[in-house]
Amino acid sequence: MTSTLDLEKNKSKGGRPPSSIWKDAIRGNPVSSGKYHATCKSCNFSWSQGNISKLEEHFANYCSEAPGSIVRKYLNKILEREDKVNKKRKIVGNNQLTMTKVACRNLGV
Ligand SMILES: [Zn+2]
């Protein structure tokens, strides 16, 4: 499972570790904020504007050379992320709707 070191890192970054993907892909020059030239270490696929979620999707869905452990790791990550999004319904600029929905649900229970 996850090592203590990883847990510590996640905590300090507010639960969103930005860099673990770079163990499995090579980060090249930054293109813009959050986007990099990147190359998959497993299959040598390269992105001219790779961001972390694109790379995670590659490992989870598309990479033909990545070992099963890596595929599973990123599949879990993506699932977790979608789970969080579904739970929080975090819509940028539409917090009020979210609050109302939560309040309604609470009243309903
Ligand atoms: Zn790959």
Image (cartoon, rainbow, N blue to C red):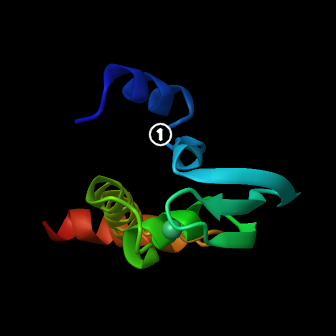
Residue 47, given in percent of the width and then of the height, sits at: 71, 71
In this view, the residue in front, 35 or 87, is 35
- Classify 10 Å Cα crowding around label 1: few (below 14), some (14-19), many (20 and above): few
**Relative to residue 107, is residue 25 depicted above or below?**
above
Q: Quadrant of residue 8?
A: top left
Residue 81, given in percent of the width and then of the height, sits at: 40, 61
Residue appearing at x 25%, y 69% in the figure = 105
**Residue on which the image places disc 1:** 15
Q: Quadrant of the C terminus?
A: bottom left
In this view, the residue in front, 28 or 88, is 28
Tag 1's secondary structure? loop
Q: Is residue 14 left or right of residue 104?
A: right
Q: Tell me how many marks there are.
A: 1
Q: Quadrant of residue 66?
A: bottom left
Residue type at mark 1 is Gly
Residue appearing at x 31%, y 26% in the figure = 3
Residue 94, given in percent of the width and then of the height, sits at: 60, 72
Q: Is residue 78 visible?
A: yes
**Relative to residue 66, is residue 16 depicted above or below?**
above
Residue 73, given in percent of the width and then of the height, sits at: 33, 54
Residue appearing at x 40%, y 75% in the figure = 64
Q: Is residue 9 left or right of residue 84?
A: right
Q: Is residue 46 left or right of residue 25?
A: right
